Image: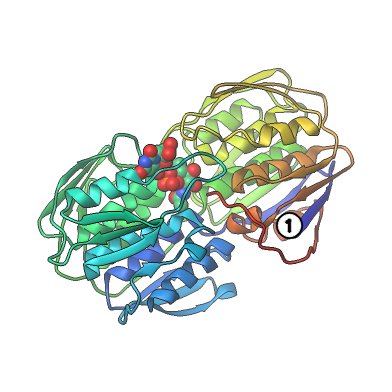
Amino acid sequence: MDRISIIGGNPLKGTIRISGAKNAALPLMTASLLTDQPLTLTNLPELHDIETLAQVLEHMGVSLTHVPSSHEIILKADDIHDKEAPYDLVRKMRASILVLGPLVARTGYARVSLPGGCAIGTRPIDFHIKGLEQMGAEIELEAGYVTARAPKGLKGADITFPLVSVTGTENLMMAAVLAKGVTRLINAAQEPEVTDLAHCLIKMGAKITGLDSTTLIIEGVDSLKAATHSILPDRIETGTYIMAAGITGGSLLLTHTDPTLIPTVLPVLMQAGIKITTTKDTIHAEHTGRLGPVDITTEPYPGYATDLQAQIMALMTIADGASIIRETIFENRFMHVPELNRMGADIQVKGNTALVRGKKFLKGAPVMATDLRASVSLVLAGLAAQGETVVSRVYHLDRGYEKVEHKLRACGAQIERIQGEASDDRTYAS
Ligand code: UD1
């Protein structure tokens, strides 16, 4: 397995182009199952998760025109010959569950391997299942698979989410666009990736109102048509690189992004002392001296994103003072803590709260990535630490950060990938 070696201490300076959002690209790709017409997606990030989902869709019979470096994919689901997403592919990426809603809505049948637990928590899919049942699907759980049957099609329903669920909202929204009648998704996720999916579905002919609110109203239609959609910028990658400027005392210009996508994150980073200036599609982040402490709680959008929790914690390990970080979305999302502590950080966890006492500096160490966002927090820490940090299990990073070491190296980071032997001894988390 590959590792990444970082010699810390270089302030990053330069320009980074932000990629399309992974978490928008995945549901958008599965939306192709809703029609026999082609769906063209541009600004597609070049990531392992995208390749995994492409394999799932190809397995089902979706034809793909896709050269990863072109950042474009054309998907055509005019011959779905296998309505099953098998374990071997689903275990690599929980988001494969996003085929369930569109597949049963379009074909009346779907069989998807249950994603199982993952590193950051139990992560059930009961909201997806209950929602589809309310829409008239018959659900069977057996042998590690969920099977959904709706031979006469789905019907509209009022569905209330007990907790805000991003992929839950996306799955049921896609199911509802082809259901008979009106579906109301109440306590729906408002994440920008959900709205991006809705915009694309509307281009395909879906009738959806209530965008950017907690109630989505979907009036089912008989069929959808071809569309072309440009995937929105990755707000998590954006926030991560702002923090890379902050933690190294550098100056980075981020392009092809959108500052309005991180309304709660920007004020937190400014409070920490990072100087941020924005235009419509760029963010300039600059920092000198010590960072200040913060007090944050992760929340559904527009609150502070759980996917940026590990990164802010890395920053706060060298802030001037003590920070409080509360994780309210996932029960086990502090696995970066022992790794950061190995680098000299002083972090104590009690329940869902981490107390981070800032130190003057971190020291490089061998550390292990445990999930996607945890792994990038270790890279951030390594960029700031004295000496060498070697991050192992970087396949987590490759799932969600396009060309991370190239982007950082171009801005002055001393970062190298050490090629390892191929192995399938991997654990996966989203
Ligand atoms: C998505 C994101 C992930 C992000 C997360 C929270 C994608 C591909 N992934 O994950 O990067 O960290 O949102 O912003 O978009 N829950 C249930 N039952 C369900 C569904 C969810 O109890 O059926 C719980 C989860 O365990 C969790 C909470 O609801 O505690 C939110 O999870 P959810 O928003 O569904 O996360 P994902 O959509 O899997």
Q: Against 306, is 279 above or below?
A: below
Residue 191 seen in render: no
Q: Is mark 1 within 8 Å of ligand 1?
A: no
- What amino acid is labelled 1 in the image? Glu
Q: Secondary structure beneath disc 1?
A: helix
Can you give x and y, in whole percent of width and height, for residue 114 in the image? 41, 54
Task: Residue under label 1, please give it.
Answer: 405
Q: Residue furthest top?
A: 321
Which of the image's four quarters has the N terminus? bottom right
Please report the residue visible at 84 percent of the width from the left and 40 percent of the height from the top. 365
Can you give x and y, in whole percent of width and height, for residue 76 in the image? 36, 78
Q: Nearer the viewer, residue 280 or 64?
A: 64
Q: Is residue 376 found left or right of 116 in the rendered image?
A: right
Q: Residue furthest right?
A: 387
In which image quadrant can residue 223 be found? bottom left
In which image quadrant can residue 346 be found? top right
Can you give x and y, in whole percent of width and height, for residue 301 in the image? 41, 38
Locate ligand 1 by image quadrant: top left
Q: Against 282, is 161 above or below?
A: above
Q: Against 374, is 62 above or below?
A: below
Q: Nearer the viewer, residue 146 or 108?
A: 146
Q: How many marks?
A: 1
Q: Nearer the viewer, residue 220 or 335?
A: 335
Please report the residue visible at 58 percent of the width from the left and 66 percent of the height from the top. 46
Please report the residue visible at 79 percent of the width from the left and 63 percent of the height from the top. 420
Q: Residues within 10 Å of mark 1 (few under 14, many from 20)?
A: many
Can you give x and y, in whole percent of width and height, for residue 203 in the image? 27, 65
Please report the residue visible at 51 percent of the width from the left and 37 percent of the height from the top. 306
